[in-house]
Amino acid sequence: MRRSGLIPLRVVACLAAALAVALFWWTWAATREDSSDGRTSIVFWGSAGLGEDVWSVVHRFEELNPGYRVVMGTAAARNITGDAQRLLTAVVGGVPPDLVWFDRFAVGEWASKGALEDLTPYIERQAAEDPYRIDLSQFFPFALDEASYAKPGSTQTKRLYAMPWSVDIRYLYSNGDLLRQEGFVDERGEPKPPRTWEELRAYNQKLTRFRVDGDPTSGISRLGFASSSGALGNSWLYMYAWQAGGELLSPDRTQVTMDSPPVVRALRFMTDLSDDVGGARQVNAFQSGVQGGPLDPFIRGQLAMKIDGNWSLGNIMDWKPDMDFIVSPAPMPADELAKGRDPITWAGGWAMVMPATAKNKTGAFKLMQYLHSWEVASRLENSLKEQKESEGRLYLPGVKANRAFYERIVQQSIAASDTIPKRLKEAYAVTAEMMPNTLFRPVTPVGQLLWNQHASAFEAAVNHQYAAEAASAGVDEMRYTLSEKSRDVQRQLDSILRPPPSTVVRWTPYLWLYVLLVAAPFVAMWLVYRKARRRFGWRPREVGAALFFASPWLFGFAVFVGGPILCSIVFSFTSYDVLSPARYIGWANYREFVDDDLCRTSLANTAFMLIRIPLVMAVSLLIALLLNRAIRGIGFYRTVFYLPAVMPLVAASLLWMQVFNPTYGLLNTVLEWLFTTAPARGCEWLIGIVTGQPFHLTAPGWLADKDWSKPSLIIMNIWTAGGGMIIWLAGLQAIPKQLYEAASIDGAGPWSRFRHITLPMLSPYVLFNLIVGIIGTMQVFGEAYIMTAGGPADSTLFYAYYLFNEAFQYFRMGYASALAWILFVVVLALTLLQLWASKKWVTYDQA
């Protein structure tokens, strides 16, 4: 007899099926292309860099080409150059945009994978009478060269894969007032920027000021010059290497030359600049307190000189238009100038590309032609000019990749204008002077890895990461550093240039294997059911209901979990970059793991973080002991302690980045006050007497210091110890009270009761927290991704973050899959080891 009030199983099944159909139809209707008006869509992923008036430009294009409709979007990537995950997903999924705003630097890497459309045929097929014809002779040659690609070491003619849009070049900015104050003037009393490396180093030493005069350990209050990049400029090792006459790749782009003598010299010079002002720790601490806009350190007079891009002109005019500054070519080595070489600079910039799988390439090229026309360039510049003037700010045009357009705009807006200050006209004159001597980063399939490793080499050098190893090997420290960092680049470049493995993965056998694996448990259950249903009294309806309620998990596992697991196993034995078919390479990925120095570094960093497990467990147990009492307001206290555990990781990371800031962070503000107190001064005096050397207590650099970065993250994890408090409270409340009563009668004190009763009875909870803690620690990722990006000097490059970079930054899915399975085996082994060892110390007695 059916019990009343229950919904029949068939009704539930029908409702679930109807919901699934409705969701499918809604998804299909929301994503299908609406072509009811007869127009063809052009999907364009643009950028704010195009200007505010880009929508009217697109509307005008649609008026001129009524057969097209432009669907405007954005790549929405954290880093479209090194982390273009959305574009990658769209290309692989078969729904790519037709036109994309793209960093020219990434063109070579994507073109080498066949992901970009060759624009050369489109350019050649243009009609001579086409009013929107793109004339390549009008563009800066270096911009076109950076947008072109041919396989390294081959005799192929370079092909154009991107249409350059903008250019950014770098030069030296100097604060004229500060140069005058320190006597760096010419015979007319005008500020004199440094011309050579030797002068730059002398300027840097004299212009830098410390919080305590003459004491670099006290912190930097004003920096003369920063060889680092980021918030303090934009020069990088590339530029210094070129100035010294070096290259990071051979002319045929098949050999990494990072450890060549000119590059070694350049890195040593950058390191000397850092060491002269207290070292990387002090520079990083100064940089961590840097902010943008009106608080820019150059604008505020906290940074005397910097090498930066032409965009800094706009920042200065926006926030301090009356600033006395000078723009000049970046200093060169004196001996290179003596050879007759002219000062050089380097450029990057943006371009537009078409994915190779774009559906509307004809329309995309027509839109590209229109966007690169004088009509659009002048319209966007006039819109920017009106916007700036409406804000009461000075309009300064950016550098266009189209030389003819740029010169025309500069002539109209700068040279012919009476309102433009003289120093700005001189800056644009320097830009024109430097254009013939502008270099660009090598176009190579390993461009992103080469960039990351060259930046990592600088971090390692200024932190003297390899000083001990270089000394023991009897090798120059800078050369040793560059050799270490170039090894991975050369290995990956060799693997790309090597003929691909001949065996392509055929997925059909694996599909059938997976179907059998999924079906096997159901067949086994059916056989068991037939054999034992009478003995256990199983009813078909009950078994069917059980399977029905389990079906969401079973379906989800089969479709979203089990399949990817099998694929990742196969990928771990292949070379696979997502954009090309997977090819078998045997155990090569696992052999590379053994030889991967950076991977060993990530493992060591991850192992260090295991320290947080006992610390977090101890703090959370202490909180639980304090709150395991019947006192007024206990609910409030439990909520307060638990609150950090439920705070989103991004919010918590941003909060702690401010707390850990070495310059104005709360933690260092308190520590610096404590260090001025009499007890702290007494400790300094006593330690100085014992050691025979002056001693001063200084606040740590925290996240900016390679020695303190991991302890900083551990401190942040301890802050969330309230999350484990709930588990400990449950364990404490499960301990029988009579055990404590009997121990008290026998004369046991608080510590004795805790040691002999509380800890043994909590041992199952200790085991649980230990297992979960190790699993979580082996997967540390979010903090490094948000707060440190693996730095400084790879000190927070954890295993999971390294795996992520290999997969989604370098597209090495095969190697990343191997790393994932190695992580799985390690975690499984550690878990089994703990379970085996727990037999000797875990007790499950409750009375």
Image (cartoon, grey):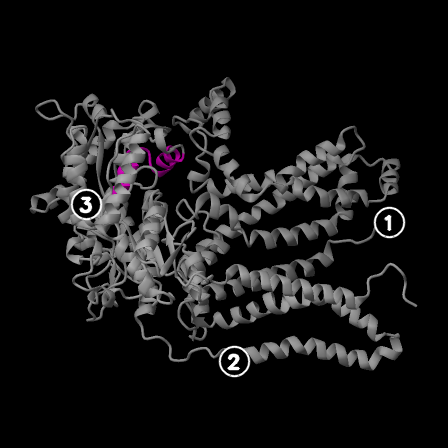
124 above or below 351?
below
Q: Which mark is residue 406?
A: 3
Instruction: Give the residue type that dot 2 points to.
Output: Thr
Instruction: Give the residue type that dot 3 points to.
Output: Tyr
Sequence order check, earlier mark of 3 and 1: 3
Q: Secondary structure at mark 3?
A: helix
Q: Residue 88 location, x and y as percent? A: 42, 61
Residue labelled with disc 2: 508
Q: Secondary structure at mark 2?
A: helix
Decide whether the magenta segment is chiefly helix, strand or loop.
helix
Side (left or right) of 373 relative to 609? left
Residue 624 located within the stretch drawn in magenta: no
Residue labelled with disc 1: 847
Residue segment shown in magenta = 270-288
350 above or below 618?
below
Q: CA distance from mark 2 to mark 1?
A: 58 Å
The quadrant where residue 27 appears: bottom right
Residue 206, visible in the rendered structure: yes
Q: CA distance from mark 3 to mark 2?
A: 55 Å
Q: Residue 811 location, x and y as percent? A: 41, 62
Q: Residue furthest top?
A: 678
